[in-house]
Amino acid sequence: MDDHGDNFGRRLEEQHPGAVQRTEEEWKQIARHVRHAANKIGPALPLCLPGESQECGRTAQQHVLAWSAAVKAAAHHLIEQAAPTPARAAHVAGPLYQSRLTELRAHDAPAASAPPHSTKAPT
């Protein structure tokens, strides 16, 4: 069984109110996409999602978390290898990364903060 470098234990069950809620099947699909991305830029990850040949017992959501960390680490390693200088690597891994992260969060924010649709007819 692959340990995924984690120790989730019971901590994953403690959801905060703003956490994205998805079904196990939705998390499984996201985990497959994240694994595919990770396998393209780093060492191969096992086929260990629930129902797969090397099933490890973790939930799909736990895999999304662990494998997203693998993608982030592989991307950081690529930045270090590709940067012509340590200063450029620091810029890309720091301010540029934070800028991209801010853009992603802003992209998700309207959907998360939009008011529910009203069924009341306009007057």
Image (cartoon, rainbow, N blue to C red):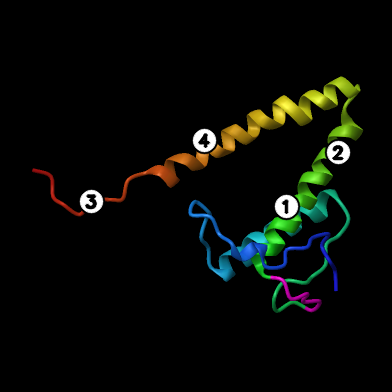
Please say if 50 is above or below 12. Answer: below
Dot 1 surroundings within 10 Å: few (below 14), some, or many (20 or more)?
some
Asked which secondary structure carries label 1, the reply is: helix
Mark 1 or 2 closer to N-term?
1
Dot 2 surroundings within 10 Å: few (below 14), some, or many (20 or more)?
some
Instruction: Residue 100: say if magenta.
Output: no
Contact flag, marks 3 and 2 (Cβ < 8 Å): no
Asked which secondary structure carries label 4, the reply is: helix
Q: Is residue 62 left or right of residue 41?
A: left
The amino acid marked with disc number 4 is Ala
Place of residue 7 in the rendered image (x, y in percent of width and height, measured from the top left): 78, 63
Asked which secondary structure carries label 3, the reply is: loop
Mark 2 or 4 closer to N-term?
2
Residue at label 2? 78
Where residue 68 is drawn, which disc sits there?
1
Front tag of 3 and 2: 3
Mark 3 or 2 closer to N-term?
2
Please say if 30 is above or below 117. Answer: below
Which quarter of the rendered picture does the N terminus lie within?
bottom right
What separation in Å lies between label 4 and label 1 (alpha carbons)? 20 Å
What separation in Å lies between label 3 and label 1 (alpha carbons)? 36 Å
Q: Is residue 60 left or right of residue 48?
A: left
**Rendered image quadrant of residue 91:** top right
Residue at label 3? 118
What separation in Å lies between label 3 and label 2 (alpha carbons)? 47 Å
Residue at 69% across / 63% down in the picture? Answer: 62
